[in-house]
Amino acid sequence: MEPKDKESNGQVPPVETVAFPFDRMMVARFREMFPRARWSDSLKAWTVPGKTARRRIDRWLSAEADRRGLFDQERGRDAYDFEPILSPYLEVHDTGFRIRTPFSRKVVEELRQVPFARWNSDDKAWEIPFASYDELQHRWEVIEGAAKRNEPDERRKRAAARKGSDEEAKARRRARERRRRRVPVPANDLPPVGRPVVTSWYGVVVITEVTGELIDTGDVAEFYPEADSDFVWAVWRNATLEELVHTWPAKTNPGKSERRRGWWRPLLNDLRDARRVAKTRERRNSLVSASSGPDIP
């Protein structure tokens, strides 16, 4: 069934999410500001459609943070003064905290659960008001631990420890397999070609071709243990940011049959993570192209 909410050009608008502590009056203000918003039980968050949804949500969150008043801010500041978080990843500024860490999915997951946390793309930092200090403090041990594990020196130490080990050899084999850009799919339940889907092995990708070649389970059981002799090879590529933005998310989690076949429609969280990765990848590619300069005959 096609979604009802479409833009005038026939494309499905992107959808953003927002979560905040329950407060009846706050929910009423939110519904008044975003009449098209819908609550998602699976995401435990509100979904807001529209190309400008993220900017409007950020403005509303900022206004709501101000509405909470000086009392909550002062209480959070007092809590910090009484029991401060002492960490190189956290800075204090006039209205709250800035957090900068090496990239870690775990850090991002934890910070997204902190009320009114927002990503400042200009400063490359998370910003959190004093009023949310209690929740930040509750999650800080996990956040800092994940950040330390992703420090370059720590990653190099782990790489050195793995050198020459069975784990390293397995990682190399896995990397070689990934470079082949192929994935097994059931011959009687093929994924759509040219549209983003989630795979059990490579996340959100776009299938470009189903070759029809039967897989040899003996050769690839290490990488695809769920695949059997009825699976065939499909070729994949990374999804572009534009493709991800115009992909409508699935409303329900994949069931056992979908996970068994190895592919399913992406959920909203899948798309948001994939969009962030695609945006970074496309920005990096554009910088590389710009730095190489024009071809000189």
Image (spheres, helix red, strand yellow):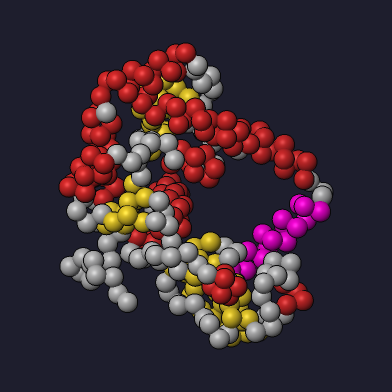
Q: Name the residue: 57% across, 71% down.
A: 256
Quarter of the rendering containing residue 69: top left
3 lies above or below 52: below
Q: Position of residue 5 (x, y in %)?
A: 23, 66
Question: Does residue 271 show up?
Answer: no
Quarter of the rendering containing residue 62: top left
Residue 150 magenta-drawn?
Answer: no
Q: Position of residue 65 (x, y in %)?
A: 28, 31
Question: Does residue 30 show up?
Answer: yes
142 lies above or below 195: above
Magenta range: 166-182
Label the magenta part by its dominant secondary structure.
Answer: helix
Quarter of the rendering containing residue 133: top left
- Taking the image as shown, residue 128 lies to the left or right of residue 165, namely left
Q: Name the residue: 45% across, 31% down.
A: 135
7 lies above or below 212: above
Q: Position of residue 243 (x, y in %)?
A: 37, 64
Q: Quadrant of the C terminus?
A: bottom left
- Taking the image as shown, residue 274 lies to the left or right of residue 12, namely right
- Taking the image as shown, residue 5 lies to the left or right of residue 97, namely left
- Taking the image as shown, residue 195 lies to the left or right of residue 152, namely left
**Furthest residue in direction top, as rendered:** 82
Q: Quadrant of the N terminus?
A: bottom left
Q: Nearer the viewer, residue 255 or 231?
A: 255
Q: Position of residue 118 (x, y in %)?
A: 36, 37
**Furthest residue in direction front, as rendered:** 24
Residue 171 magenta-drawn?
Answer: yes
